[in-house]
Amino acid sequence: MSQRFARVTPAPLLLAMLGALAAAATLSACSGGKPAQSAGHGDSAAAPDATAWHDPSPHTVRFVSVPGVTVPGPVRIEVLDWGGTGQPLVFVPGLEDTGHIFDDFAPQFTDHFHVLAVSRRGWGASDHPDSGYTIPALASDVHAVLDSLHLSHVDLVGHSIAGQELTWVAATYPGQVDRLVYLDAGFDYHAHPVPRPYPEPPAMTAADSASPAAGLAYARRLSDAPIPEATYRATEKLSPSGRDLGPASPPAFTEAVVRSAEALAPPFGKVHVPVLAIYDWPISAAEFLPWIAATDTSAPHWLAVAQKWHAAQRDEFKAKVPRARIIELRGATHYIFLVRPDTVAHAMRAFLAPPSATAGR
């Protein structure tokens, strides 16, 4: 999801490329630190509760306790379960997203897989402890969730910065993972930090924050993707009348994860399972900076910067994971699985199909 990094760094679009320029997060981050709206002005106790909303995605919700890091007691992690039979297929979201980012995409795999998603500590309904926001700790959370649910021989799918967690889980717990799918996620932020700074996105206006529908529309404009409403609602504070009061998670959580990703080289050399990596290849600056018009004189510069960064990441991944299957989608945006769901699903099915299903073709 979009990282609200804009609040703590002059690089608001660190995240456009880094991986989360999605919805709710971008939404609040881009507001430029707008003050929280107080109750009143349509937020009186008598007003209807606009936050009483039902997620239409056909999943159940459970919570799994994982060990604390520097604080006592366990940390509860939200797990979404769409059911299905077969090998576990577990989705991990991008930074500042939750498992709900897959609400519209994940259910289509239940015919051959038991489909689940996790919401990273610090976001959504998962606990928000003050510590544990390093890549190894977050990978340990994924491992602990799988262990608690007695899941082995798992296929892991990660979007954006979740590629870091996938790599560390596969390298650290090699017997637990069978295959990895990187959705615009095969990046090494240590070798190739995200270029900074980027042009600031437009601030959220009073009209944008007036209702969940307006906030979601704003988030979708800034991410250039059909972000599911559930992940927007899970990451924003909403008043009883539905006014957006700002992000539900402190910007320091995002900052810590980004620092960790840039400090540690992912252990690609220890990944010995089959890998599918699907990348976006940006063909316009508007893909990652949707507020820059095609006629803006700075657009060619930012496109060149983005293409150089993506090419370096892709080429390094090819070199360090030489057996990986690589697919590039032109102009699919960072949210490739939301913008090109059929294409991405088809590629995943072909990769994940058991040998017997493709034999003789």
Image (tube, grey):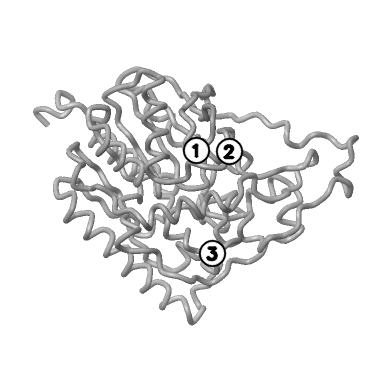
Q: Relative to residue 334, is residue 240 drawn left or right? A: right
Q: Along the polypeptide, which appears first: circle 2 or circle 3?
A: 3
Towards the viewer: 193 or 307: 193
Q: Which residue is mark 3?
A: 12
Please tell me whether residue 39 is drawn above or below residue 7 in the rendered image: above
Please tell me whether residue 269 is drawn above or below residue 221 in the rendered image: above
Q: Which residue is mark 2?
A: 128
Q: Relative to residue 36, is residue 236 drawn left or right? A: left
Which secondary structure lies at badge 2?
loop
Quarter of the figure with the C terminus? top left
Q: Of the numbered discs in the image, which one, if any, rests on residue 119?
A: none
Which secondary structure lies at badge 1?
loop
Alpha carbon separation for disc pair 1 and 3: 29 Å
Residue in view at x 18 percent, y 49 percent: 321
How many labels sit on residues?
Answer: 3
Residue in view at x 51 percent, y 67 percent: 11
Q: Relative to residue 359, is residue 109 drawn left or right? A: right
Report x, y in % for residue 27. Answer: 62, 54
Label 1 environment density (alpha carbons within 10 Å; few <14, some 14–19, many ≥20):
few
Which secondary structure lies at badge 3?
loop
Residue in view at x 36 percent, y 30 percent: 143
Q: What is the three-letter code of the residue carrying label 2?
A: His
Label 2 environment density (alpha carbons within 10 Å; few <14, some 14–19, many ≥20):
some
Towards the viewer: 195 or 51: 195
Are circles 2 and 1 on residues that touch, CB within 8 Å?
Answer: no
Residue lying furthest left:
360
Alpha carbon separation for disc pair 2 and 3: 23 Å
Q: Which residue is mark 1?
A: 70
Are circles 2 and 3 on residues that touch, CB within 8 Å?
Answer: no
Q: Along the polypeptide, which appears first: circle 2 or circle 1?
A: 1
Q: What is the three-letter code of the residue carrying label 1?
A: Thr
Of badges 1 and 3, the one in the foreground is 1
